[in-house]
């Protein structure tokens, strides 16, 4: 049994994780941390990690970048692994995550979907095959309540492509200047509206042909299931940084 502390327990993802965990016999939600107590919670609740006192195996975080310091402090103090699914971190916060991984196991991914991680591998392959003969554009769509733009997933895709096209330059706002598109550019575009769960499209545009790789998430369940699988995977691991690629290798 893997006992979980859920950060962001009153949010939509918190509800999805609780629902997904209820269908499994290898996972239990022991406690939740959030500013607001979720209705009908059957676990220990605390407004912050400073108020939390409980024993668990792994922290699963779908919350807000502002929670990072207290969460990592609690995790390091209690030698507890943490699955970080929150996006929107700045560079200093990302460095804190990597520093924490020297003391505890950290699973860090901007997207917990198996399909998205397959897209990343396909995009890298396409970039390697096409070289600079194809222009690359990434378009992401999310609901109108999402705070960060571009999405962490769009940046994951761009970063993966950049390991192949190492001279890449990210462009977010084309109307800010007038010039021809440079071959080094990766355009990244954000759309916010309605209750779109998550749509990502990678466009490779060449002379007289276009290749499009796309993924559509129809519910938040896919992310909840991925996060829970990551929690089970991370339990009893040695300190270090882990991601979806590590999980997939173990399940091959």
Image: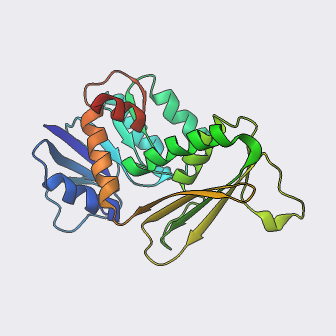
Pick the quarter of the image with the C terminus: top left
Name, please, the residue furthest toward the right: 179
Query: Which of 239 and 136 lies nearest the eye of the viewer?
Result: 136
Pick the quarter of the image with the N terminus: top left
- Percent from the top left, x then y, of residue 115? 40, 50
- Percent from the top left, x then y, of residue 141? 53, 67
x 14%, y 55%: residue: 22
Q: Is residue 32 rendered to the left or right of residue 105?
A: left
Query: Which of 102 and 48 lies nearest the eye of the viewer?
Result: 102
Q: Is residue 30 rendered to the left or right of residue 171?
A: left
> How many dots with numbers?
0
Above or below, 173 against 81 in this view is below
- Percent from the top left, x then y, of residue 142? 50, 67
- Percent from the top left, x then y, of residue 118? 44, 45
Above or below, 23 against 77 in this view is below
x 40%, y 38%: residue: 244
Query: Which of 61 and 136 lies nearest the eye of the viewer?
Result: 136
């Amino acid at each position: 049994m893997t006992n979980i502390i859920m950060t962001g327990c009153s949010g939509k993802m918190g509800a999805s994780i609780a629902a997904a965990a209820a269908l499994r016999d290898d996972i239990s939600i022991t406690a939740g941390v959030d500013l607001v107590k979720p209705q009908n919670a059957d676990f220990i609740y605390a407004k912050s990690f400073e108020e939390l006192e409980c024993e668990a195996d792994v922290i699963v975080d779908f919350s807000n970048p502002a929670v990072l310091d207290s969460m990592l402090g609690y995790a390091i103090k209690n030698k507890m692994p943490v699955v970080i699914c929150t996006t929107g971190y700045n560079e200093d916060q990302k460095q804190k995550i990597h520093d924490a991984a020297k003391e505890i196991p950290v699973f860090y991914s901007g997207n917990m979907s198996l399909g998205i991680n397959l897209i990343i591998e396909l995009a890298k392959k396409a970039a390697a095959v096409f070289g600079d003969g194809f222009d690359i554009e990434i378009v992401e769509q999310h609901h109108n309540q999402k705070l960060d733009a571009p999405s962490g997933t769009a940046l994951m895709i761009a970063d993966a492509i950049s390991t192949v096209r190492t001279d890449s330059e990210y462009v977010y706002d084309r109307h800010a200047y007038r010039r021809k598109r440079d071959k080094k550019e990766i355009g990244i575009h954000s759309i916010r509206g309605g209750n779109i769960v998550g749509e990502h499209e990678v466009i490779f545009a060449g002379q007289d042909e276009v290749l499009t790789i796309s993924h559509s998430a129809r519910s938040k369940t896919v992310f909840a299931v991925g996060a829970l699988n990551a929690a089970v995977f991370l339990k009893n691991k040695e300190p270090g940084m882990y991601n979806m690629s590590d999980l997939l290798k173990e399940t091959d």
